[in-house]
Image (cartoon, grey):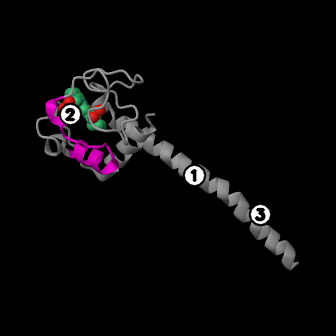
């Protein structure tokens, strides 16, 4: 009987593993979906058309990218010389107060300070690749 019990436990654990992975994935997707709603504040200037610049540069692949590195976009001198890389910390600073992070930037001031909204927006930006 003991052996059967063990097998039952093992089976349950094996079943739980993919379920957990799926749950994490579903959470990421839900976060990104919520972030897409927040992104409406950005969409007027940042096109979701892959690699297309509009008034602002394309944000595809922005997470981990060096600031002001999209070809053929006329960045401000301030952003070009900022030396920033768009890691999560800098992106949070940028969306909560872009002019505070890079004084002289051409991007209109945005102020998303709610941590949950920032989380959603970051999940969405991570999904742009
Ligand atoms: C009114 C137009 C406008 C809005 C709205 C806007 N942006 Fe921008 N964004 C720009 C411009 C213009 C630049 C280039 C800034 C510069 O060169 O100083 C920029 C630059 C950026 C960059 C740096 C990209 C790079 O290649 O270095 C990020 C990241 C960014 N915006 C994110 C956002 C997010 C997220 C939002 C919404 C919360 C947003 N922007 C809203 C116009 C806008």
Q: Residue at x 54, y 52 (%)?
A: 24
Q: Distance between the residues labelled 3 and 2?
A: 56 Å
The verdict on label 2 being within 8 Å of ligand 1 is: yes
Locate the C terminus and report the quarter of the image it occupies.
Answer: top left
- Judge left or right: residue 116 versus residue 1: left
- At which x and y percent is residue 27? 50, 49
Pointer 2: residues within 10 angstroms few (<14), some, or many (20+)? some
| Labelled pair 2, 1 in contact (Cβ < 8 Å) | no
Q: What span is in magenta?
A: 76-96
> In which image quadrant can residue 98 be found?
top left
Height in image: 7 above or below 87?
below
| Labelled pair 1, 3 in contact (Cβ < 8 Å) | no
Q: Which residue is the site of mark 3?
A: 11
- At which x and y percent is residue 49? 40, 22
The verdict on label 3 being within 8 Å of ligand 1 is: no
Q: Which residue is the site of mark 1?
A: 23
- At which x and y percent is residue 113? 24, 49
In primary-sequence order, the first of circles 1 and 3 is: 3
Magenta region includes residue 98: no
């Amino acid at each position: 009987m003991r052996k059967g019990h063990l097998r039952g436990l093992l089976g349950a654990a094996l079943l739980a593993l993919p379920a957990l992975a799926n749950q994490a994935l579903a959470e990421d997707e839900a976060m990104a979906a919520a972030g897409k709603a927040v992104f409406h504040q950005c969409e007027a200037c940042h096109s979701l058309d892959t690699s297309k610049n509009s008034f602002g540069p394309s944000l595809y692949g922005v997470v981990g990218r060096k600031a002001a590195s999209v070809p053929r976009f006329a960045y401000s001198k301030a952003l070009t010389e900022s030396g920033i890389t768009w890691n999560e910390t800098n992106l949070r600073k940028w969306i909560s107060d872009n002019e505070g992070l890079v004084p002289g930037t051409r991007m209109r001031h945005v102020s998303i300070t709610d941590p949950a909204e920032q989380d959603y927006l970051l999940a969405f930006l991570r999904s742009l690749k």
